[in-house]
Image (spheres, rainbow, N blue to C red):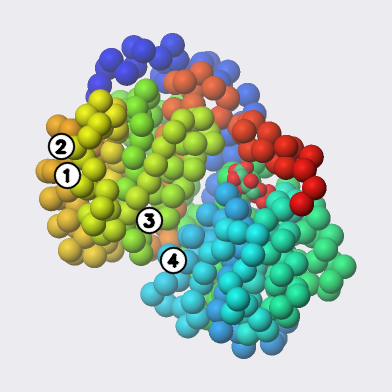
Amino acid sequence: MDQTTCIRSKVDLNSAHQINTGDPEGMFQALWNLPEQCAEAFKIATKFSQPNDYKNVHAVIISGLGGSAIGGDLLRVCVANKSTVPVIVNRDYTLPAFVGEQILVIAVSYSGNTEETLSAYAMAQKNGAKIIALTSGGKLKELAMRDGVPVVTVPGGLQPRAATSYLFIPALVIMAELGFIPTVNDEISNLITEMQGLREQYQPEMPIADNLAKQIAQKLFNKTPLIWGSCSTTEVAAIRWKGQINENSKSAAYWNNFPELNHNEIVGFEMPEALLKNLEVIILRDEADHERVKQRMEITKSIIEGKVSGITEVFSKGTSLLTRLYSLNYIGDYASIYLALLYGVNPTPVKMIDLLKNELMKIKS
Ligand code: PA5
Protein backbone atom coordinates (compact mmCIF):
# COMPACT_ATOMS: atom_id res chain seq x y z
CA MET A 1 0.00 0.00 0.00
CA ASP A 2 1.28 3.44 -0.93
CA GLN A 3 1.39 5.17 2.46
CA THR A 4 2.06 8.61 0.96
CA THR A 5 -1.47 8.76 -0.39
CA CYS A 6 -2.81 8.17 3.15
CA ILE A 7 -0.68 10.93 4.56
CA ARG A 8 -1.98 13.49 2.07
CA SER A 9 -5.62 13.06 3.10
CA LYS A 10 -6.74 14.44 6.44
CA VAL A 11 -9.20 11.58 6.77
CA ASP A 12 -8.28 8.32 8.46
CA LEU A 13 -10.32 5.48 7.01
CA ASN A 14 -9.75 3.51 10.20
CA SER A 15 -11.71 6.10 12.18
CA ALA A 16 -15.41 5.20 12.45
CA HIS A 17 -16.10 8.73 13.70
CA GLN A 18 -14.49 10.38 10.65
CA ILE A 19 -16.27 7.99 8.31
CA ASN A 20 -19.67 8.72 9.85
CA THR A 21 -19.13 12.49 9.82
CA GLY A 22 -18.03 12.36 6.17
CA ASP A 23 -21.20 10.61 5.04
CA PRO A 24 -24.03 12.65 6.59
CA GLU A 25 -26.69 11.51 4.12
CA GLY A 26 -26.11 7.81 4.56
CA MET A 27 -24.55 6.46 1.36
CA PHE A 28 -22.93 3.66 3.38
CA GLN A 29 -26.31 2.72 4.81
CA ALA A 30 -27.78 2.57 1.30
CA LEU A 31 -24.93 0.26 0.27
CA TRP A 32 -25.37 -1.92 3.34
CA ASN A 33 -29.05 -2.27 2.41
CA LEU A 34 -28.27 -3.60 -1.08
CA PRO A 35 -29.28 -7.24 -0.38
CA GLU A 36 -32.56 -6.07 1.18
CA GLN A 37 -33.12 -3.76 -1.80
CA CYS A 38 -32.67 -6.74 -4.13
CA ALA A 39 -35.18 -8.76 -2.11
CA GLU A 40 -37.72 -5.93 -2.15
CA ALA A 41 -37.18 -5.26 -5.85
CA PHE A 42 -37.83 -8.95 -6.54
CA LYS A 43 -41.06 -8.81 -4.54
CA ILE A 44 -42.21 -5.72 -6.47
CA ALA A 45 -41.33 -7.42 -9.76
CA THR A 46 -43.26 -10.60 -9.00
CA LYS A 47 -46.40 -8.58 -8.23
CA PHE A 48 -46.23 -6.84 -11.60
CA SER A 49 -48.04 -8.39 -14.53
CA GLN A 50 -47.44 -7.34 -18.08
CA PRO A 51 -49.94 -7.61 -20.93
CA ASN A 52 -49.79 -10.97 -22.70
CA ASP A 53 -49.06 -9.52 -26.15
CA TYR A 54 -45.76 -8.13 -24.84
CA LYS A 55 -44.44 -11.69 -25.31
CA ASN A 56 -44.47 -11.16 -29.07
CA VAL A 57 -41.92 -8.36 -29.24
CA HIS A 58 -38.67 -8.81 -31.14
CA ALA A 59 -36.39 -6.63 -28.99
CA VAL A 60 -36.26 -4.88 -25.64
CA ILE A 61 -34.99 -1.32 -25.31
CA ILE A 62 -34.10 0.08 -21.93
CA SER A 63 -34.30 3.86 -22.20
CA GLY A 64 -32.81 5.94 -19.39
CA LEU A 65 -29.86 8.04 -18.31
CA GLY A 66 -27.15 7.86 -15.67
CA GLY A 67 -28.19 5.92 -12.59
CA SER A 68 -31.34 4.82 -14.38
CA ALA A 69 -29.43 3.44 -17.37
CA ILE A 70 -26.76 1.37 -15.63
CA GLY A 71 -29.34 -1.29 -14.73
CA GLY A 72 -29.97 -1.56 -18.47
CA ASP A 73 -26.28 -2.27 -19.06
CA LEU A 74 -26.36 -4.89 -16.35
CA LEU A 75 -29.39 -6.48 -17.98
CA ARG A 76 -27.81 -6.39 -21.44
CA VAL A 77 -24.68 -8.18 -20.23
CA CYS A 78 -26.39 -10.66 -17.88
CA VAL A 79 -28.84 -11.96 -20.48
CA ALA A 80 -26.62 -11.75 -23.57
CA ASN A 81 -25.82 -15.46 -23.66
CA LYS A 82 -29.36 -16.66 -23.01
CA SER A 83 -31.93 -14.15 -24.25
CA THR A 84 -34.03 -14.94 -27.30
CA VAL A 85 -34.35 -11.21 -28.05
CA PRO A 86 -31.72 -8.48 -28.12
CA VAL A 87 -31.52 -5.96 -25.29
CA ILE A 88 -30.48 -2.46 -26.29
CA VAL A 89 -29.68 0.40 -23.93
CA ASN A 90 -30.78 3.82 -25.18
CA ARG A 91 -29.41 6.94 -23.49
CA ASP A 92 -30.99 9.64 -25.61
CA TYR A 93 -33.97 11.87 -26.33
CA THR A 94 -34.85 9.74 -29.34
CA LEU A 95 -35.24 6.06 -30.10
CA PRO A 96 -33.92 4.18 -33.12
CA ALA A 97 -36.15 4.33 -36.22
CA PHE A 98 -37.00 0.61 -36.03
CA VAL A 99 -38.98 1.12 -32.80
CA GLY A 100 -42.60 0.22 -33.42
CA GLU A 101 -45.23 -2.22 -32.19
CA GLN A 102 -42.80 -5.15 -32.26
CA ILE A 103 -40.50 -3.52 -29.71
CA LEU A 104 -40.79 -3.32 -25.92
CA VAL A 105 -39.48 -0.04 -24.54
CA ILE A 106 -38.86 -0.02 -20.79
CA ALA A 107 -38.66 3.68 -19.92
CA VAL A 108 -36.58 3.94 -16.74
CA SER A 109 -36.28 7.09 -14.68
CA TYR A 110 -35.87 6.92 -10.92
CA SER A 111 -37.18 10.45 -10.42
CA GLY A 112 -39.58 10.15 -13.31
CA ASN A 113 -38.61 13.62 -14.45
CA THR A 114 -35.61 13.16 -16.73
CA GLU A 115 -36.32 15.03 -19.93
CA GLU A 116 -34.46 12.66 -22.26
CA THR A 117 -36.42 9.68 -20.93
CA LEU A 118 -39.72 11.56 -21.15
CA SER A 119 -38.92 12.45 -24.74
CA ALA A 120 -38.05 8.82 -25.59
CA TYR A 121 -41.25 7.72 -23.85
CA ALA A 122 -43.28 10.12 -26.02
CA MET A 123 -41.59 8.76 -29.14
CA ALA A 124 -42.28 5.16 -28.09
CA GLN A 125 -45.94 6.08 -27.61
CA LYS A 126 -46.11 7.82 -30.97
CA ASN A 127 -44.54 4.82 -32.74
CA GLY A 128 -46.95 2.36 -31.15
CA ALA A 129 -44.27 0.48 -29.19
CA LYS A 130 -45.13 -1.73 -26.22
CA ILE A 131 -44.10 0.27 -23.15
CA ILE A 132 -43.43 -0.30 -19.48
CA ALA A 133 -42.55 2.60 -17.16
CA LEU A 134 -40.12 1.83 -14.34
CA THR A 135 -39.95 4.70 -11.86
CA SER A 136 -40.52 5.95 -8.34
CA GLY A 137 -43.06 8.53 -9.59
CA GLY A 138 -42.80 11.96 -11.21
CA LYS A 139 -44.00 12.92 -14.66
CA LEU A 140 -43.22 9.50 -16.15
CA LYS A 141 -45.62 7.77 -13.81
CA GLU A 142 -48.22 10.47 -14.40
CA LEU A 143 -48.00 10.09 -18.20
CA ALA A 144 -47.96 6.30 -18.08
CA MET A 145 -51.07 6.21 -15.91
CA ARG A 146 -52.79 8.66 -18.23
CA ASP A 147 -51.86 6.53 -21.24
CA GLY A 148 -52.76 3.19 -19.68
CA VAL A 149 -49.12 2.09 -19.83
CA PRO A 150 -48.12 -0.51 -17.19
CA VAL A 151 -46.00 0.99 -14.43
CA VAL A 152 -43.56 -0.67 -12.04
CA THR A 153 -43.41 1.70 -9.08
CA VAL A 154 -40.35 1.44 -6.86
CA PRO A 155 -39.71 3.22 -3.53
CA GLY A 156 -38.41 6.78 -3.78
CA GLY A 157 -36.10 8.78 -1.53
CA LEU A 158 -32.74 7.44 -2.72
CA GLN A 159 -30.15 8.78 -5.09
CA PRO A 160 -30.83 7.06 -8.46
CA ARG A 161 -27.37 5.46 -8.37
CA ALA A 162 -28.21 3.94 -5.00
CA ALA A 163 -31.42 2.46 -6.39
CA THR A 164 -29.90 0.34 -9.17
CA SER A 165 -31.42 -2.92 -7.98
CA TYR A 166 -34.90 -1.39 -7.91
CA LEU A 167 -34.36 -0.43 -11.54
CA PHE A 168 -32.57 -3.59 -12.69
CA ILE A 169 -34.24 -6.57 -10.97
CA PRO A 170 -37.78 -5.79 -12.17
CA ALA A 171 -36.47 -5.56 -15.76
CA LEU A 172 -34.68 -8.91 -15.33
CA VAL A 173 -37.80 -10.57 -13.91
CA ILE A 174 -39.93 -9.09 -16.72
CA MET A 175 -37.54 -10.67 -19.26
CA ALA A 176 -38.09 -14.05 -17.58
CA GLU A 177 -41.85 -13.60 -17.24
CA LEU A 178 -42.09 -12.80 -20.93
CA GLY A 179 -40.20 -16.02 -21.67
CA PHE A 180 -37.12 -14.37 -23.19
CA ILE A 181 -34.82 -15.95 -20.59
CA PRO A 182 -35.24 -18.89 -18.18
CA THR A 183 -36.48 -18.17 -14.65
CA VAL A 184 -34.11 -16.08 -12.54
CA ASN A 185 -35.60 -16.80 -9.11
CA ASP A 186 -32.73 -18.97 -7.82
CA GLU A 187 -30.12 -16.63 -9.25
CA ILE A 188 -31.65 -13.67 -7.42
CA SER A 189 -31.94 -15.59 -4.19
CA ASN A 190 -28.25 -16.61 -4.40
CA LEU A 191 -27.33 -13.02 -5.26
CA ILE A 192 -28.96 -11.79 -2.06
CA THR A 193 -27.15 -14.36 0.11
CA GLU A 194 -23.77 -13.74 -1.51
CA MET A 195 -24.07 -9.95 -1.25
CA GLN A 196 -24.84 -10.32 2.47
CA GLY A 197 -21.45 -12.02 2.83
CA LEU A 198 -19.61 -9.38 0.80
CA ARG A 199 -20.93 -6.33 2.64
CA GLU A 200 -19.22 -7.49 5.83
CA GLN A 201 -15.85 -7.23 4.06
CA TYR A 202 -16.24 -3.64 2.82
CA GLN A 203 -18.16 -2.01 5.66
CA PRO A 204 -16.70 1.05 7.45
CA GLU A 205 -15.91 -0.93 10.63
CA MET A 206 -13.54 -3.23 8.73
CA PRO A 207 -9.98 -1.85 9.10
CA ILE A 208 -7.95 -0.78 6.06
CA ALA A 209 -5.67 -3.81 6.31
CA ASP A 210 -8.62 -6.16 5.75
CA ASN A 211 -10.78 -3.92 3.58
CA LEU A 212 -10.02 -4.03 -0.14
CA ALA A 213 -12.45 -1.18 -0.88
CA LYS A 214 -10.55 1.15 1.48
CA GLN A 215 -7.22 0.06 -0.01
CA ILE A 216 -8.46 0.82 -3.53
CA ALA A 217 -9.72 4.24 -2.45
CA GLN A 218 -6.25 5.03 -1.10
CA LYS A 219 -4.67 4.01 -4.38
CA LEU A 220 -7.06 6.25 -6.32
CA PHE A 221 -6.58 9.29 -4.09
CA ASN A 222 -5.07 12.19 -6.04
CA LYS A 223 -4.83 9.99 -9.12
CA THR A 224 -6.88 9.79 -12.32
CA PRO A 225 -8.69 6.45 -12.27
CA LEU A 226 -8.78 4.56 -15.55
CA ILE A 227 -11.09 1.57 -15.27
CA TRP A 228 -10.83 -1.26 -17.75
CA GLY A 229 -13.36 -4.05 -18.14
CA SER A 230 -13.99 -6.71 -20.72
CA CYS A 231 -16.66 -6.57 -23.41
CA SER A 232 -19.52 -9.03 -22.64
CA THR A 233 -18.61 -9.32 -18.95
CA THR A 234 -17.03 -6.67 -16.74
CA GLU A 235 -17.60 -3.76 -19.13
CA VAL A 236 -20.74 -2.91 -17.19
CA ALA A 237 -18.78 -2.78 -13.92
CA ALA A 238 -16.19 -0.50 -15.54
CA ILE A 239 -18.99 1.89 -16.56
CA ARG A 240 -20.42 1.70 -13.04
CA TRP A 241 -17.06 2.35 -11.34
CA LYS A 242 -16.44 5.36 -13.55
CA GLY A 243 -19.89 6.81 -12.83
CA GLN A 244 -19.64 6.17 -9.09
CA ILE A 245 -16.20 7.76 -8.85
CA ASN A 246 -17.54 10.78 -10.77
CA GLU A 247 -20.71 11.16 -8.72
CA ASN A 248 -19.68 9.97 -5.25
CA SER A 249 -16.02 11.02 -5.16
CA LYS A 250 -16.47 14.11 -7.42
CA SER A 251 -13.37 12.93 -9.27
CA ALA A 252 -12.50 12.61 -12.92
CA ALA A 253 -12.49 8.95 -14.03
CA TYR A 254 -12.47 7.15 -17.36
CA TRP A 255 -13.26 3.67 -18.60
CA ASN A 256 -12.62 1.46 -21.58
CA ASN A 257 -12.85 -2.23 -22.38
CA PHE A 258 -10.90 -5.12 -23.84
CA PRO A 259 -10.36 -6.04 -26.59
CA GLU A 260 -11.25 -2.63 -28.09
CA LEU A 261 -8.66 -0.69 -26.08
CA ASN A 262 -5.92 -2.84 -27.62
CA HIS A 263 -6.80 -1.31 -30.97
CA ASN A 264 -6.39 2.37 -30.07
CA GLU A 265 -5.99 3.42 -26.42
CA ILE A 266 -2.88 1.30 -25.94
CA VAL A 267 -1.04 3.34 -28.56
CA GLY A 268 -1.51 6.49 -26.47
CA PHE A 269 0.63 5.29 -23.58
CA GLU A 270 3.57 7.39 -24.72
CA MET A 271 2.44 10.94 -24.16
CA PRO A 272 2.03 13.17 -22.24
CA GLU A 273 4.26 11.42 -19.72
CA ALA A 274 3.21 13.51 -16.70
CA LEU A 275 -0.45 12.72 -17.30
CA LEU A 276 0.25 9.01 -17.76
CA LYS A 277 2.23 9.01 -14.50
CA ASN A 278 -0.92 10.11 -12.71
CA LEU A 279 -3.12 7.34 -14.08
CA GLU A 280 -4.16 4.59 -11.68
CA VAL A 281 -5.36 1.71 -13.82
CA ILE A 282 -7.93 -0.70 -12.43
CA ILE A 283 -8.52 -3.90 -14.39
CA LEU A 284 -11.78 -5.66 -13.58
CA ARG A 285 -11.55 -9.38 -14.18
CA ASP A 286 -13.98 -12.24 -14.42
CA GLU A 287 -13.63 -15.96 -15.00
CA ALA A 288 -15.91 -15.68 -18.05
CA ASP A 289 -13.61 -13.22 -19.81
CA HIS A 290 -12.64 -14.58 -23.23
CA GLU A 291 -9.40 -16.59 -23.03
CA ARG A 292 -7.71 -14.32 -25.59
CA VAL A 293 -8.83 -11.29 -23.57
CA LYS A 294 -7.13 -12.77 -20.50
CA GLN A 295 -3.92 -13.05 -22.52
CA ARG A 296 -4.39 -9.51 -23.85
CA MET A 297 -4.68 -8.24 -20.26
CA GLU A 298 -1.35 -9.79 -19.32
CA ILE A 299 0.45 -8.34 -22.36
CA THR A 300 -1.19 -4.93 -21.85
CA LYS A 301 -0.06 -4.82 -18.21
CA SER A 302 3.52 -5.42 -19.28
CA ILE A 303 3.26 -2.62 -21.89
CA ILE A 304 1.96 0.05 -19.49
CA GLU A 305 3.87 -0.98 -16.35
CA GLY A 306 6.20 1.82 -15.22
CA LYS A 307 4.40 4.36 -17.40
CA VAL A 308 1.38 4.72 -15.08
CA SER A 309 1.14 5.33 -11.37
CA GLY A 310 -0.09 1.81 -10.68
CA ILE A 311 -2.14 -1.13 -11.88
CA THR A 312 -4.62 -2.94 -9.67
CA GLU A 313 -6.59 -5.99 -10.67
CA VAL A 314 -9.93 -6.66 -9.02
CA PHE A 315 -11.41 -10.13 -9.43
CA SER A 316 -15.15 -10.78 -9.34
CA LYS A 317 -16.60 -13.19 -6.78
CA GLY A 318 -19.71 -15.33 -6.91
CA THR A 319 -21.47 -18.35 -8.30
CA SER A 320 -23.19 -16.72 -11.29
CA LEU A 321 -22.33 -13.97 -13.75
CA LEU A 322 -25.06 -11.87 -12.13
CA THR A 323 -23.48 -12.14 -8.67
CA ARG A 324 -19.97 -11.70 -10.02
CA LEU A 325 -20.90 -8.44 -11.76
CA TYR A 326 -22.71 -7.27 -8.63
CA SER A 327 -19.59 -8.10 -6.59
CA LEU A 328 -17.47 -5.83 -8.79
CA ASN A 329 -20.04 -3.06 -8.67
CA TYR A 330 -20.29 -3.43 -4.90
CA ILE A 331 -16.60 -3.02 -4.18
CA GLY A 332 -16.46 -0.12 -6.66
CA ASP A 333 -19.39 1.56 -4.94
CA TYR A 334 -17.72 1.24 -1.54
CA ALA A 335 -14.33 2.37 -2.87
CA SER A 336 -15.90 5.47 -4.46
CA ILE A 337 -17.45 6.50 -1.13
CA TYR A 338 -14.19 5.96 0.75
CA LEU A 339 -12.49 8.04 -1.93
CA ALA A 340 -15.07 10.82 -1.39
CA LEU A 341 -14.17 10.80 2.30
CA LEU A 342 -10.44 10.99 1.52
CA TYR A 343 -11.17 14.07 -0.61
CA GLY A 344 -13.33 15.50 2.18
CA VAL A 345 -16.46 15.66 0.00
CA ASN A 346 -19.98 14.53 0.81
CA PRO A 347 -20.64 11.50 -1.45
CA THR A 348 -24.39 12.14 -1.82
CA PRO A 349 -25.06 15.48 -3.59
CA VAL A 350 -24.51 15.82 -7.33
CA LYS A 351 -24.53 19.61 -7.65
CA MET A 352 -23.36 19.68 -11.26
CA ILE A 353 -26.21 17.42 -12.44
CA ASP A 354 -28.72 19.55 -10.51
CA LEU A 355 -27.23 22.73 -11.95
CA LEU A 356 -27.47 21.42 -15.50
CA LYS A 357 -31.05 20.28 -15.06
CA ASN A 358 -32.01 23.67 -13.57
CA GLU A 359 -30.29 25.64 -16.33
CA LEU A 360 -32.03 23.53 -18.99
CA MET A 361 -35.38 24.12 -17.34
CA LYS A 362 -34.90 27.84 -17.84
CA ILE A 363 -34.46 27.34 -21.59
CA LYS A 364 -37.57 26.47 -23.59
CA SER A 365 -37.07 23.38 -25.77
O1 PA5 B 1 -27.05 9.53 -10.54
C1 PA5 B 1 -27.74 10.47 -10.88
O2 PA5 B 1 -28.27 11.27 -10.08
C2 PA5 B 1 -27.98 10.70 -12.34
O3 PA5 B 1 -27.11 9.94 -13.12
C3 PA5 B 1 -29.45 10.39 -12.67
O4 PA5 B 1 -29.69 9.02 -12.56
C4 PA5 B 1 -29.77 10.90 -14.08
O5 PA5 B 1 -29.60 12.29 -14.12
C5 PA5 B 1 -31.18 10.55 -14.51
O6 PA5 B 1 -32.11 10.86 -13.51
P1 PA5 B 1 -33.23 9.78 -13.16
O7 PA5 B 1 -32.44 8.57 -12.70
O8 PA5 B 1 -34.04 10.37 -12.07
O9 PA5 B 1 -33.96 9.52 -14.41
Amino acid on which disc 1 is placed: Lys
**Residue 55 is at least partly visible in this image:** no
Q: Nearer the viewer, mark 1 or mark 4?
A: 1
Q: Nearer the viewer, mark 2 or mark 4?
A: 2
Amino acid on which disc 4 is placed: Cys
Q: Do tag 1 and tag 4 residues touch (Cβ < 8 Å)?
A: no
- Determine whether 49 is above or below 75 in the image: below
Judge left or right: residue 178 versus residue 82. Answer: right
Q: Do tag 2 and tag 4 residues touch (Cβ < 8 Å)?
A: no
Q: Do tag 4 and tag 3 residues touch (Cβ < 8 Å)?
A: no
Q: From mark 1 to mark 4, how far is it between C-alphas?
A: 27 Å
Q: Nearer the viewer, mark 4 or mark 3?
A: 3
**Quarter occupied by residue 71:** bottom right
**Residue 5: % across, % down:** 32, 18
Q: From mark 4 to mark 3, how far is it between C-alphas?
A: 11 Å
Q: Secondary structure at mark 1?
A: helix
For this orientation, the residue located farthest to the right is: 146
**Residue 285: % across, % down:** 28, 52
Report which residue position mark 2 lands on: 305
Judge left or right: residue 220 versus residue 239. Answer: left
Amino acid on which disc 2 is placed: Glu
Classify 10 Å Cα crowding around label 3: few (below 14), some (14-19), many (20 and above). Answer: many
Q: Do tag 1 and tag 2 residues touch (Cβ < 8 Å)?
A: yes
**Residue 235 badge:** 3
Q: Which of the image's four quarters has the N terminus?
A: top left
Q: From mark 2 to mark 4, how far is it between C-alphas?
A: 32 Å
Q: Earlier in the sequence, mark 2 or mark 4?
A: 4
